[in-house]
């Protein structure tokens, strides 16, 4: 089973609204990363948050990490049509050696 | 700056044939990875390599072979392709200076493989 699981599986919003995606994982981690994938393309790294960090910002992106609940959220503020993509969380289990990807959240932003 | 490239981008082959997917990176990253992406499964790690001549299995290695004679290249070979290996294959590379899983992975554009 996947270490990281995103919720919801799909999300449709209007341009200008905020989009929130959640990720839950099972074991202790070194870090958690969020990636974006546009249709037919490779994954692009968005943010890496380490296990000792609680919140991180990058432009319109805000990521939170709650290690007690083994969960993370990605918030995209003031969404744009260009944000339409699939978003994946990826976890690096503590003591492990592989980054594990979830199945992703498909975000559709309507213009 | 080419970054990380994959070839071919699209490949159609028949069951039982050998297929090799190529991956090349220009950053001299120590780590390289092969993933397959299927609907409902996200990305699953096939093999990874920590350095030239050092490779290890990932989550779904059966039916695949890798080699890494040079730091910049990491080919993936399907020795006898099966229909279940129809998928999109992504190569990635990373510095991983703090060890595996500690750094950003940079992905290639993918190879869409169809096995008939």
Image: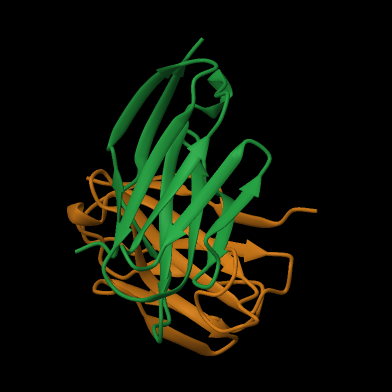
Q: Residue B43 placed where, x, y %?
A: 35, 56
Residue at 61% x, 70% y is B94
Q: Residue B50 placed where, x, y %?
A: 54, 84
Residue at 63% x, 64% y is B24
Chain B drawing hue:
orange
Horizontally, residue A73 falls left or right of residue A77, namely left
Horizontally, residue A26 falls left or right of residue B4, namely left
Q: Residue B105 placed where, x, y %?
A: 57, 63
Q: Residue A35 placed where, x, y %?
A: 50, 49
Horizontally, residue A106 falls left or right of residue A16, namely left
Residue A1 in view (yes/no): yes
Residue B107 in view (yes/no): no
Q: How many labels does the image show?
A: 0
The residue lying furthest to the top in this view is A111
The residue lying furthest to the bottom in this view is B53
Residue at 55% x, 17% y is A16
Viewer-side residue, A34 vs A85: A34
Viewer-side residue, A57 vs B37: A57
Horizontally, residue A91 falls left or right of residue B28, namely left
Image quadrant where one finds the C terminus of chain B: top left
Chain A drawing hue:
green
B21 in relation to A86, above or below: below
Question: What colour scheme does the image use?
Answer: by chain
Which quadrant holds residue B4? bottom right
The residue lying furthest to the right in this view is B1
């Amino acid at each position: 089973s996947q270490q990281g699981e995103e919720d919801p599986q799909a999300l449709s919003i209007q341009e200008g609204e905020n989009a929130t995606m959640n990720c839950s994982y099972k074991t202790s981690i070194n870090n958690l990363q969020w990636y974006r994938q546009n249709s037919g393309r490779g994954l692009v790294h968005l943010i890496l948050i380490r296990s000792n960090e609680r919140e991180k910002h990058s432009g319109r992106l805000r990521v939170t990490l709650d290690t007690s609940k083994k969960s993370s959220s990605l918030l995209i503020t003031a969404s744009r049509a260009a944000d339409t993509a699939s978003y994946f969380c990826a976890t690096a289990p503590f003591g492990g050696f592989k980054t594990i990807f979830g199945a992703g959240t498909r975000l559709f932003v309507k213009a | 700056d080419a970054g990380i490239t994959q070839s071919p981008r699209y490949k159609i082959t028949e069951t039982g044939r050998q297929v090799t997917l190529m991956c090349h990176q220009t950053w001299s990253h120590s780590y390289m990875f092969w993933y397959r992406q299927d609907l409902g499964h996200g990305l699953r790690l096939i093999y990874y390599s920590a350095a030239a001549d050092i490779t290890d299995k990932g989550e779904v290695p059966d039916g695949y072979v890798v080699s890494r004679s040079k730091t910049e290249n990491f080919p993936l070979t399907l020795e006898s392709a099966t229909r279940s290996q129809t998928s999109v294959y992504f190569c990635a590379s990373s510095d991983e200076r703090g060890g595996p899983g500690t750094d950003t992975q940079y992905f290639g554009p993918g190879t869409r493989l169809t096995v008939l």
